Amino acid sequence: MTGLTGLTIAAARDGLRQKKFSARELAEAHIAAVAAARPLNAYLVETPERTLAMAADADKRLAAGEGRALEGLPIGIKDLFCTEDVATTAGSRILEGFRPPYESTVTANLWRAGAVMLGKLNMDEFAMGSANVTSAFGAVENPWRRRHDNRPLVPGGSSGGSAAAVAARAALAATGTDTGGSIRQPASFCGIVGLKPTYGRCSRWGIVAFASSLDQAGPMTRTVRDAAIMLGAMAGHDAKDSTSAPIAVPDFEAACARPVRGLRIGIPREYRLDGGPAEIEALWQQGRRWLEAAGASIVEISLPLTKYALPAYYIIAPAEASSNLARYDGVRFGLRVPGESLEAMYEETRGAGFGVEVRRRVLIGTYVLSAGYYDAYYLKAQKVRTLIARDFASAFENCDAILTPTAPSSAFAIGEKMDDPVAMYLNDVFTVPSSLAGLPAISLPAGLSDDGLPLGLQVIGRAFDEETVLAVAAALEAAAGFSAEPAFLAGGRA
Amino acid sequence: MALDKATVARIAALARIKVPDGEQEHLASELSNILAWIAQLNEVPTEGVEPMASVADMRLPVRDDVVTDGNVRERILANAPQAQRGFFVVPKVVE
Amino acid sequence: MSLIEGRTGQWEVVIGLEVHAQVIAKAKLFSGAATAFGAEPNTQVSTIDAAFPGMLPVLNRFCVEQAVRTGLGLAAEINLVSVFARKNYFYPDLPAGYQISQYDRPIVGKGRLTLDLADGTTREIGITRLHLEQDAGKSLHDQHPHATFVDLNRAGVALMEIVSEPDLRSAEEAGAYLRKLRAILRYLGTCDGNMEEGNLRCDANVSVRRSGAALGTRCEIKNVNSVRFVMQAIEYEARRQVELLEDGGTIAQETRLFDAARGITRPMRSKEEAHDYRYFPDPDLLPLVLEESWVKEIGARLPELPDAKKARFIDTFDLSVAEADLLVAEKATADYFEAVAHGRAGKIAANWVTGDLFGVLNKRGVGIEESPVAAAALGELLDLIADGTISGRIAKDVFAAMAETGEGAKAIVQARGLRQVTDSGAIDAAIETVLAREADKIAEYRSGKDKLFGYFVGQVMKATGGKANPALVNERLRTRLG
């Protein structure tokens, strides 16, 4: 695939600097791709006028030699980020019509770096989901299809629109958020790179809150280097977010070139799933061989409490969500369903405005915090969380990065796993532990399943050591040489 | 821990979410399944373990006592489903 | 201890008070919006206060300082580690659907407060805790027949919730507690304590029991907005409970409102039925950790508080407990008094401040900050009495004139020629003038009507236009009349 929409960020950046094409041309190509990608339902809002206006500005700056880090590069924004004056719904009916009077810090950082906005990307409602089937505005389709099977597949979730758009070449990159795997798992399902930074690396200000102690913004791109470039622009301390780390932003792009020779790579035995697909186990083995070939050493490690991470997460995240979503009450913004009384208005509005998965999680969250259950559930889960973080801390005494599969399967068909919520939750088994511990983790496409679908490998690092994570991921990327493309490409085939 | 319809109704009321009658039974069984699955946490010994306060390893930041915000009534009311004379308007509350 | 006489015997009232005190600070507890009273609706509201999607709290350091200062002023333990917790409930003036408060780890622990009772005695009351929390906005139910109007100006303003132990035993004590707490807060500058404006609100927990019995079921009377109403509400509620129990009923634990117009308490209609607030530590905020040295430094800068000032006044100026109580009730009054009393007779200064000055202030309906007579000016007047320039009697007229005109004592005495007559020759002459016309009365006096002496003194004073030194007149008259 050649053409402007098939470039990496790094290549597009170079192309603009070398005047091979203009920001305007890049924008136009992407605006067309966004329109062409409509069958995927990846975009909720397309903002072509804004794209062109921003591109025009970018061309001026580039001409004056004042191009910033992401000058003129068209990206999509997950609809969980509040974008000033642009409809923001978090994938929910309850925020229909909401136009934020402010810009999230992360997107403001991106615009300040010169990036150009293509539109808002579809997602699971309030970031709750692993398949992007819970959006009030329809499911997103994965641009990949199984070999010999025409059923539409899920892109993963909750950042399903972001992953699908990037995979389909309808954006150079996209922002996502990751609470329990919502960047990494869709990245794996869509054959792209997705990075969840350390908790506190990116500001949460202006991002619709799901689970405050877990939510993190991160880049979704087609290469590891692109993810590093995006993260460099997104990250940074924000005084408006009391959980934002007062820590400098290193040169993430440079870190990608660091050699992995001498690094110790931990392989956690508990990530071996009984009865899991053999191809995933095989890819994981392949990953460790690639890293050994590059000079890293392999260490068997143990993260004993791995299997308890999911239940702990499904107490903590819904609990925080039940409180964070209380503000959606029909009073100050969004949907209001009229009621005879105030209480009726609350109940009707929230009943109509929240989808079934959100409702499930808010009710679970309300229950586990309620009188008589707090100790048994919430407090217990937070204690288990401490132990899980300790597991990782111990492991990192013996290794510098941890290698695991990203997801327990490749993308499944839309409509599958819908009978039992827990079956859907199990998608996050490999991603949730590092979320609970607040550690940085990346997924990169490393191979294909037997039926031709992308499979991802995950690299987890120490807190604020995205640099090692990126270095290891870059080495794996180079070794894997993943070049397969999805069946659907928004720009069309070259 | 199995939840019955009455408990689900109580929680739904606490959360101010209307659950149509027809859905209550199914919802109760779904929630019960989730809670049953979650119950495996009880297998983990946690005596003497501190609950995690935050993964963020830092001090709580503070700000100075300076007025830096407000005076943006239009912005505050712009998305309101109902506003009048500078107030948000809701159905009357009986006290 | 004042007990209630019921039909079947005596009952003890047990009262605990929860006071919400609005913190004096320019900005709110977790946002940069202003806190000033009386602004146009929703003009002192940030998107954080209005709980828009994605908004996050950032703690105002000065509000923490004010809470620590208040805790130290209540001789309380300061908890160096405290945690902000969310209290979850739905109400239109609580935009987030939760209030950021503190639950099991408040910033201030146990303390104490001393009551000054009317009979001059004191009693120590325990303080259970003090914590910081956000205030809610205001819901106006009377603007429209079918709608409630919501103003979020007050939403997010810092409050200190101060909880007393259930140590109070009468409405009188409750009143004394509130007045004392208010005075301490005003001395510290941490709260204006203005109940009418709503920056000090009181909830009263009331139960009754037979002496020595276990605590009875309590009812909470919410949001009473004056000391007088708190006392009335407590008295009514205690009676209500006694009557109910004596009739064989039981007390339902409930929240009640005080209906000031009818002087009764009645149950609140709605509110969170289950009161299940689902407290949990706010994940947007880390635990608050205070440096010991910072707390000490605040302690070192505390002003002298009412109890200490009262003791010092009694000791230094030889005042009575009642006088001292009056003077220390407001720091401004105490400062005024001290300025007047400096280098002068304390008791005399106290009399003048609590008597004549308070009289003028009351008549004009102003506080001591707006006194028409400055402390230095009153001091000057007292000096004129002390050095004999004028009599005490004349001084009262001079004071009245000072309050009227704003002029100084010396100037008025000069202008009106009010200098005291102390020349014995002049007094003797006046005595002769009076006695010359009072032959009959002299005879009556000599035959035993002692009371007439005062009459003669009065006549001599009149003859000198009130300016004669009364003591000297007495002395000379005694000598003259024998």
Image (cartoon, rainbow, N blue to C red):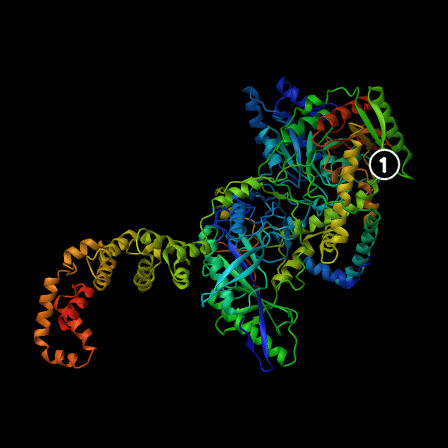
Write down the quadrant of residue A313 in the picture. top right
Q: x, y percentage for residue A28?
A: 64, 29
Per the image, label 1 sits on a secondary structure element best described as helix
Write down the quadrant of residue A479 in the picture. top right
Chain label for disc 1: A
**Residue C4 vs residue A467: left or right?**
left
In this view, A253 is above or below C167 = above
Q: Nearer the viewer, residue C294 or A82?
A: C294
Q: Residue at x 53, y 43 (%)?
A: C296
Q: x, y percentage for residue A10?
A: 68, 22
Q: Residue furthest top?
A: A18
Q: Around disc 1, counting alpha carbons within 10 Å, would you say few (fewer than 14), some (14 to 19), or many (20 or more)?
A: many
In this view, C371 is above or below A434 = below
Q: Nearer the viewer, residue C328 or A298?
A: C328
Can residue A282 be seen here?
yes
Q: Quadrant of the N terminus of chain A?
A: top right
Q: x, y percentage for residue A236?
A: 62, 32
**Residue A253 vs residue C174: left or right?**
right
Write down the quadrant of residue C347 in the picture. bottom left
Q: Nearer the viewer, residue C320 or A188?
A: C320
Q: Quadrant of the C terminus of chain A?
A: top right
Can residue B94 be seen here?
no
In this view, C467 is above or below C411 = below
Q: x, y percentage for residue C405?
A: 22, 57
Please give the residue where the numbered disc 1 appears in the rendered image. A271
**Residue C418 vs residue A91: left or right?**
left
The number of callouts visible is 1
Amino acid at dot 1: Tyr
